[in-house]
Image (tube, rainbow, N blue to C red):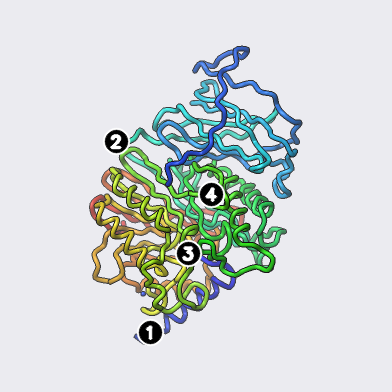
Amino acid sequence: MAAGLSRRGFMAGIVAAAAAAACSSGSDRVAPTSTAWPATSGSPPTSAGISPPSTDPGPDLPLDVFTLGVASGDPLPDSVILWTRLAPDPLHGGGMPDAEVPVVWEVARDPSFATLVASGVATASPTFAHSVHVDAKGLEPGTRYHYRFTAGLQRSPVGIARTAPAAGAEVDRLRFLFASCQDWTDGYWTAWPHAADEQPDLILFLGDYIYESGVGDPGAVRKHNSDEVVTLGDYRNRYALYKGDPGLQRAHAVAPWVLTWDDHEVENNYAGESPQDPHDGVDFAQRRAAAYQAFYEHQAIRVRPPDQGHDEIYRTIDWGGLARFHVLDGRQYRSDQPCQGVADLARDCSARHAAGATMLGAAQEQWLGRQFASSKAAWNVIANQVIFTPLPLGGVFFNMDQWDGYPEARTRLLGQIAATKLSNPVFVTGDIHASGVADVSDAGPDDPVVATELVGTSISSSFPTELAALAGPVISAVPHVKWFDALHRGYVACDVTQDQMAVRYRLMATTARPTSDVSTATSWVIRSGTPGAQRV
């Protein structure tokens, strides 16, 4: 969802829609691996027969280089990506010497690291802001591990990682959470400590991990002292600000994450190679390339570093035979938003129905069709940035930044679901700073339900309180929308078995203070073989 003027414009469109209604709706690539060094003969082996590698400690390091915590992500049955970044002065470029630094990584079955199962040495290079991406291989399927890093004489916090179950394995249960949209200035991230307490197997993050905008208005809940970010150094500092949050660090440390991006990782409402608004003196291609590199540098993600300003992040993650996660990139390849209106909203126009318009791009569409066709999972979770369900507000307005701006592309995707007889498709969605549950069909109110969409609220990004009461009735009146809430922030917890997906909307009492209570606002169940969610 757009920030600032764009969000106000969206709300203005809601008002217009209400008035109208009253008068009349992967990639197969792997991350670069670190060098796996053999056990050092001079070190006594652990009970697993693996010794920590010895290495020259490199240049003298400032104190406290692990200020940004640790993370794991994109688990496979035999490996998981491990991440950290050395940054003793995180908000001012990192503060590291302009030199490569060796970093020892270790994986163990126990938190004391008495039983090492894998270790090696990675290089933290200034080219990538002294970030470390390790593909820790040779692990057992469906296993919980502890991991840590050592640079010089300093040791990182310990993180928990999990490998995915073996391919096709019978899996009794899976708990995953999904969340999105954590604007620093809009509020405290009171949801993350509660999310960590859920002990999830996976956390999906659906975009807007950072916001590119400046300090914001004087009424911002939390302030920072930087302007809108446009250069690589700017983006690095912004990620460092966000990743310094203790609650976010804890959530990263308790489980592997699977991330995609939306617009604010680069610029609000950009589309492909088109910015929303050109900035004087800023080359958008260079800005996007800088943003993509900073995203890679700060996430535990199974992709190669960006190449010439492009980064292929769409991919699938399998959880045995129980679930396949189809992780989409709805920004990098999309056509520009059609029609002209107030911010995101506009009346229908012929460009909205152009056959060549795309949300995902031709290559990603073809890849997704192959993933659907090859999936043998009981559940297929489509990790998606923007609302998929048709929302013709007042029957005349459409949000052109959502799939409503690309109805032909939506029809093609639904055709792929039908052609492959995809088992139990569920869209999980962020972006809009509101919660919702919808049955998915194509466009007409009488079209059959073919999937479910779960729209999660934001971690902190706001939906104006004074307009939430108006937006609720307008959106709830749209066919197939079963529930909507715009007042609360939080995350969504999903417990999956072969028979059902149980869904809890976990919403915070407040984000105006550093801590908050959490409660389950509503619960839903999706039963295997029956598309659509039922309230419980």
Identify the residue under disc 4: 192
**Residue 351 picture location, percent across and down:** 41, 74
| Amino acid type indicated by mark 2 | Glu
Q: Which mark is residue 170?
A: 2
**Residue 216 picture location, percent across and down:** 66, 66
Q: Could you say whether the residue bearing mark 3 is in a helix, strand or loop?
A: loop
How far, Cα to Cα, is label 2 from label 3?
A: 35 Å
How far, Cα to Cα, is label 1 from label 4?
A: 40 Å
| Amino acid type indicated by mark 3 | Ile
| Amino acid type indicated by mark 4 | Trp
N-term mark: 2 or 1: 1
What residue sits 50% from the left and 31% below the top? 136
Horizontal placement of 408 versus 330: left or right?
Answer: left
Q: Is residue 508 visible?
A: no
The residue nearer to you, when weighing 183 against 190, is 183
- Vertically, is 275 above or below 90? below
Q: Could you say whether the residue bearing mark 4 is in a helix, strand or loop?
A: helix
How far, Cα to Cα, is label 3 from label 4?
A: 19 Å
The residue nearer to you, when weighing 517 against 17, is 17
N-term mark: 3 or 1: 1
Identify the residue under disc 3: 432
Q: Which mark is residue 22?
A: 1
